[in-house]
Amino acid sequence: MEISITKMSENGQVVIPAEIRRDAGIKPSAKFLVFNENGNIMLKQIKKESLREDMLLLEKIRRSEQEIKKGRVVKADSSMSDEEIDDLLTA
């Protein structure tokens, strides 16, 4: 995993350092989903071949957050398969 330091400009722009872009294969005009999780900003590169899965994942996260706010929780184990976890989330 590459780690680098960058800063935000007066206009709110953040440069992804060249070594990080190279390592991740990010090309000019790449698009990203931007997440704010308790002040931690995360980027996920949008790729045509995985956009549908990304959108489904975002919907699952949104529904899970709503369920947690209602006090409904389900425990998953890291040894569970993706299908088993999906079954828990859709139950």
Image (cartoon, rainbow, N blue to C red):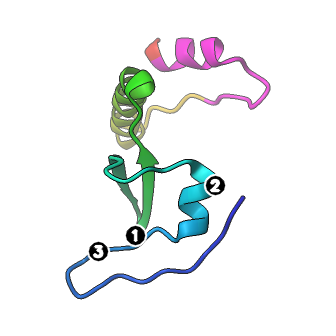
Q: In the rendered view, does 20 fall on the left or right side of 57?
A: right
Q: Is 19 in front, or is 42?
A: 19
Total marks in image: 3
Q: Can the viewer see residue 53?
A: no
Q: Which mark is residue 48?
A: none
Name the mark nearer the viewer: 2 or 1. 2
Q: In the rendered view, does 73 fall on the left or right side of 43?
A: right
Task: Tell me the residue that label 3 is attached to.
Answer: 13
Q: CA distance from mark 2 to mark 1?
A: 25 Å
Q: What secondary structure is marked by label 3? A: loop
Mark 1 in CB contact with mark 3 (< 8 angstroms): no
Indicate which disc, 2 or 1, sits on the residue closer to the N terminus.
Answer: 2
Q: Looking at numbered disc 1 in the image, what kind of residue is underneath it?
A: Gly
Is residue 77 covered in magenta?
yes
Residue located 36% across and 21% down the image: 52
Residue located 71% across and 17% down the image: 81
Q: Is 69 in front, or is 42?
A: 42
Occupied quadrant, residue 87: top right
Indicate which disc, 2 or 3, sits on the residue closer to the N terminus.
Answer: 3
Tell me which segment is drawn in magenta: 75-89
Q: Which mark is residue 39?
A: 1
On screen, residue 57 above or below 46: above
Q: Which mark is residue 23?
A: 2
Occupied quadrant, residue 49: top left
